Every structure is written in C-alpha cells, then in structure tokens.
Image: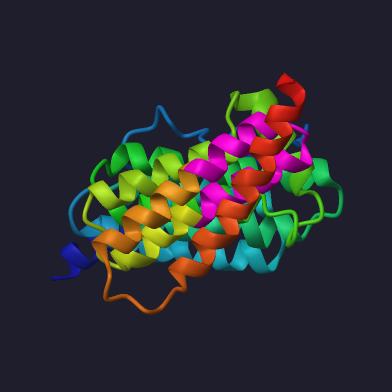
Amino acid sequence: MFGKRTLLLFALLCAIFFINVCIVSFRDTSANKSIHYDPAESIPLLLMGGFRGIAVDFLWARAIARHEEKKYYELLTINNLIAKLQPNFPAVWIFQAWNMAYNIAHEWGAPQNKWKWIYTGLNFAKKGAVKNPKSGDLFFELGYMYLHLFDQRIFKYAPYYREQLKKEEGEDNYETSVYWLRRSLENDPKLHNILAIERTICHALWHAALCAEREGNFERALQYTESAIHEWETYRTNHPEDTSANVAEFIGMLDKKRKFFQGLSSENSW
C-alpha cells in the first residue's frame, strides 16, 4: 500500500513540476507583451487516466489564483493547459473565452490592450469550436460575443475593435456573428432556446444595418435591413404562437427604414 501511495505522490509532483515549467517558460517568452495564446501546442497531453482529473483540479485552482493576482499572461498558458486536458468540454472553452474577452479586457485602459484580450478570447473560442464541431451552445456564445462586444452603445471602443477585426482577420463582426448563430441552430444547442437564437439573428442583422448607416454605406444598410425583415417574417410564420416579441412592431420599424434607404438610393441614381 505504501508503494502505491508513494508512486501516486511522485506522479502528482512530477505533473505539478511540469506544469510549473510550462508556466515559467511562457512568462519568460511573454516579456514583450505579445500574446502567443497556445505555447504548449506541441506538448502532448500531460497526464492520462485518473491523473488527468487531479491535474485539471490543480490547474483550475492555479488559474483562479493567477486571475486574482492579475498575472494574466500566466493565466493564459494555464487556460491552454486546461483546454488540452479537457478539449471536448465546451464549457471550458466558453468560460475561458468569456473571461479573457470580458473580465481581463476590462482591466486594461488602452483600447489596444483591451482589443488584444478580446481578440485572444474570440480566437480561443474558435479553437474550441474546431475541437467541438457539433456544439451548438459554443457556437451560440461565439455568435453572441461577435455581436455584443462590438456594440457601440455598450463599449466605448467598439468602433476600434470593429476596425481591428477587419484589419487582422478581414472579417465583419456582424456577418461573423450571424454565421456562428446559424451554425448554433444547425447543431442542436442544449442550453439556449431556439426561438431566442432566431431572434438574436434578427437583431444582429438590424444592428448591422444601423452600423452600415453610421459608416455611410447606405446600400449595405438597405441589404441588412431587408435581410432583417425577411428573418422576422420567417420567424412570425414559423412561430405564430410566440408573444415574447412584438414581431409586427419590429417589421413595421424596419419597413420604414427600408423605405428611407430606398429613397436615398433613388435620389443617388437619379
């Protein structure tokens, strides 16, 4: 019995030592403040069998401590080690992505630093989507983040984030949001209501139209408005019993906006 306990303790100590080496190594290579969000990509799974659960518990405790200490670059490598040990648990990817894109980003003042962590969180979630190609819930979270994090009514630097996303990824956040929301519907989400996801798509298209109008792209604004009307009309047809949203009011408001954009288009053509 003593021999088994000694072996277990030795294995655990080796695992903790190896994890600490990874963390220290990442801290040393992060002195330039650039984020390389997966430094352990080439490292195989650290522990197998029953030892994996012990390592995960240790890492979660370590992650909480590093977050409280505001040692975010060390936290980043711990997050990746947790994800490597629990790659097929969507909740792991969702929690860590939200923590980086919201909580850690909030700690920074400069928009460049905020965006660095938002971008890292979004890409962390996308990596989780690759590992979990049938997770409707993870897809929804991604779609919602691409909608909410770029909302100018809520986030002061949202226009900056939008421009950076275009420069670094060539993506439009609203189109990306709708893409992931539609994938969520196709993959049977367990934690999110289907009707709520469909309504979120309608709102995402409406916000895309408003953003295009602010940016002076009225042709694009008209296209988004027409798409939003189509989505709401489809929603009303598919869910006539739903009274949680005033669909007729939304469609009426969007139709007025459509006529406004059509008028602008006619004036420019004339």
Of residues 61 and 227, which is closer to you in this image? 227
Residue drawn at point x = 44 percent, y = 67 percent: 247
Q: Is residue 13 visible?
A: no
Of residues 213 and 20, which is closer to you in this image? 213
Residue drawn at point x = 82 percent, y = 46 percent: 111
Residue 254 place in picture, x, y as percent: 57, 54
Q: The C terminus appears in which quarter of the rendering?
A: top right
Instruction: State the count of labels.
Output: 0
Residue 13 place in picture, x, y as percent: 39, 56
Of residues 117 and 222, which is closer to you in this image? 222
Q: Is residue 205 visible?
A: yes
Q: Residue furthest front?
A: 270
Residue 88 place in picture, x, y as percent: 27, 49
Q: The N terminus appears in which quarter of the rendering?
A: bottom left
Magenta portion: prevailing SS class: helix
Does 223 appear in magenta? yes
Residue drawn at point x = 23 percent, y = 46 percent: 134
Does 205 appear in magenta? yes
What's the magenta region? 203-226
Left or right of 40 in this view: 91:
left
Of residues 198 and 187, which is closer to you in this image? 198
Q: Residue furthest bottom?
A: 243
User: As displayed, is residue 66 above or below residue 43?
Assistant: below
Q: Residue furthest top?
A: 269
Left or right of 111 in this view: 30:
left
Residue 180: quarter of image: top left
Residue 166: quarter of image: top right
Residue drawn at point x = 69 percent, y = 45 percent: 260
